[in-house]
Amino acid sequence: MRKRDLCALLLGAVLLSGCQGFTPAPTSDEPPPFEFRLGPGDRLHMNVWGEKQLSQDMQLGPDGAISVPLVGDVKLSGYTLDEARVELAKRLKAGYVDPAVSLSLLEMRSHVIHVTGEVAEPGTVGYVRGATALAAIQAAGGARPGIADLGEVRLIRRRTARPEVYGVDINAILAGEARDVWLLPGDALYVPTRTLVRWNRFWRLLWPWSDPIEEQR
């Protein structure tokens, strides 16, 4: 997801964060199927047995290709790791006899989950099959105590031209009253600010010398 598109989606979530009636995020017993395929930004390590000069770390460029010595650019975007290994071995046969290629993933950057709002470390976390909303928030350093509204988390999912926005009640998940939500690559989570905290920020802008509004119990 492009940064500009992500910002637009998150802005919509922010504007709607105070609204009620969001459809709860869908849940299921099993995580959705996912087969990892390489994409731009992914970092790999290639090892060719007996050829130290070919053993190196590589990163897929914006075009989904890597640069291999004596071979040139090899496009691997859309390949599984095993398919990429086979493709590299095939290309290396032009200059080497039966090259034994091994390939490992160092860092996955093409499949991520975006976490923003009131968390300790807003940004992206790598996607793995079985990733959940609660785990993603924890991976982003956790929610900011006393500030984050965990009952009104928004899940923004873009599978079509029109993004879908769901409500996720993390408080209910923590209390065992609701299922955690499986995530998909490219999902974005927005953790909003508690209403009282938002009011206090506004209050201090107008009357910085006054005491904050206290929560009524």
Image (spheres, helix red, strand yellow):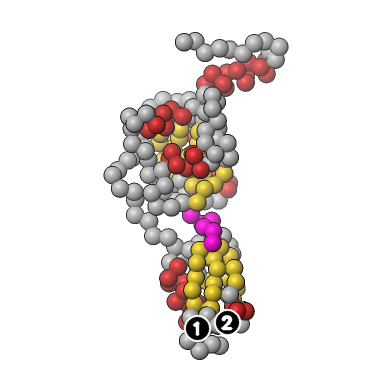
Image-quadrant location for residue 167: top left
**Relative to residue 189, is residue 24 drawn left or right?**
left
Q: Which mark is residue 91?
A: none
What residue is at 41 percent from the left and 25 percent from the top?
A: 20
Farthest residue to the left: give it: 29
State the residue in front, 23 or 80. 80
Asked if marks 2 and 1 touch (Cβ < 8 Å), the reply is yes
State the residue in front, 109 or 8. 109
Question: Which segment is the magenta one?
Answer: 106-112
Q: Residue 51 carries which label?
A: 2
At mark 1, the secondary structure is loop
Q: Could you tell me residue 209's position as x and y percent? A: 71, 11
What residue is at 56 percent from the left and 21 percent from the top?
A: 197
* Gap in angstroms between the C-alphas marked 2 and 1: 9 Å
What residue is at 58 percent from the left and 12 percent from the top?
A: 213
What amino acid type is highlighted by mark number 2? Glu
Q: Which mark is residue 99?
A: 1
The numbered mark, 2 or 1, whose residue comes first in the sequence reads 2
What residue is at 34 percent from the left and 31 percent from the top?
A: 176
For the question of whether residue 5 can be seen, the reply is no
Other-residue count near label 2 (Cα within 10 Å), few / some / many at <14 / 14–19 / ≥20: few
What amino acid type is highlighted by mark number 1? Pro
Q: Could you tell me residue 159's position as x and y percent? A: 41, 49
